[in-house]
Image (cartoon, helix red, strand yellow):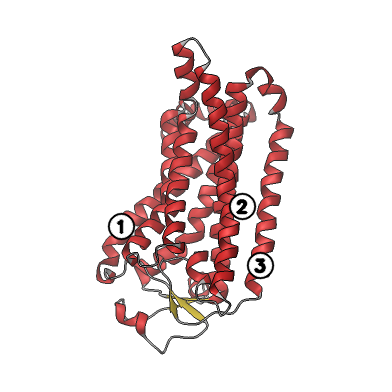
Amino acid sequence: MTNTSIFFSLFRVCPQPTMVIFNSTTSSSSHFLLTAFPGLELVHVWISIPVCCLYIIALLGNSMILFVIIVEQSLHKPMYYFLFMLSAADLCLTISTLPTVLGVLWFHVWEISFNACLIQMMFVHTFSFFESSVLVAMAFDRFMAICNPLKYATILTDMTIMVIGLIICIRQVIFIFTMSLFLKSLSFHGGQELSHPFCYHPDVIKYSYSKAWISNSLGMFLQLYLSDTDLSFILFSYVLILHTVLSIAAPKKQQKDLGTCVCHLCAVTVFYMPMISLSIIHCLLSSTSSVVCSILANVYLLLPPVLNPIIYSLKTKTIRQAMLQLLQSKCSRGPNVRSLRGGWD
């Protein structure tokens, strides 16, 4: 059996990419039905072109940032360690949805088994909350750099970064363990149509046999505990940062300090705004158009991985120079490779 047949054994290909298949009563009770841009099934191939371009940008951009930070010794600093974690989270989040999104758009693979759906859902939410935790750590880094610059080097050591990374990982393990215990006790209605081309907790949990308010309450609790708590810490950090910056007399110094926060603020905005909007739609606005939900879901999962590498490469001079040097070395195959790697050779 080839790798392709093994992969698609998790899914079942429906015969026609039309809305009729979603109303079929012959679907297996052990499957969910994925959707992507309802009503536009006949042009899925054309829609897949910009979607694939976004996936390629996300994969290449984040991979390049990871490689540059590993290779370039001048980037072995706390700020770039956190950027490494952010790019790793974006890369994993992109990979976790890539199979089903392209499966729906290219191969009309509508059905996904319960087990595959739950596994994908765990990956999507785990890496999403991991990215949220990393954004908190990056806010702490900016707080220390601006509000306590004299203590920055003594507090944010390599050991401190390792401890922060360990705490983030432990937090995700607790989340995975809690969700696994909860999902293990549930059973679901089979053959139900989901709102997205991937499995998303608020979308899946509404088809469980348990009482809807119990499932939604747990989902909202995890959302508040993880994402909203993280966002509160980030906002509080920037209140302190803004207070410190406004107390600086020199305008140029104010502009410089605020300029170091632009990339992180952009990353926070492109991550939390779509996620909060999608959560509100699922929890409060059940009558929202399925097309709007589908577009917003793809924005939520693709916008941060696509924009974060662009933002940091354009706004961070060190990252931009390292990337340019890497590209030049790949084109010339000359001595620039040695200068990029520095003391690693």
Which residue matches tag 2?
225
In the foreground, 237 or 258: 237
Q: Which mark is residue 132?
A: none
- Callout in the foreground (2, 1): 2
Q: Is residue 294 above or below residue 12?
A: above
Query: Can you give x and y, in whole percent of width and height, for residue 246 in the image?
Result: 50, 18
Task: Write the residue at 54% across / 23% down.
Answer: 243
Please tell me which of labels 1 and 3 falls first in the chain: 1
Query: Can you give x and y, in whole percent of width and height, for residue 240 in the image?
Result: 57, 27
Please tell me which of labels 2 and 1 falls first in the chain: 1
Which residue matches tag 1?
49
Query: Can you give x and y, in whole percent of width and height, for residue 160 in the image?
Result: 72, 34
Please tell me which of labels 3 and 2 falls first in the chain: 3
For badge 1, the amino acid type reads Ile
As measured in the structure, the alpha-carbon distance from the residue carrying label 2 to the one carrying label 1 is 37 Å
For badge 2, the amino acid type reads Tyr
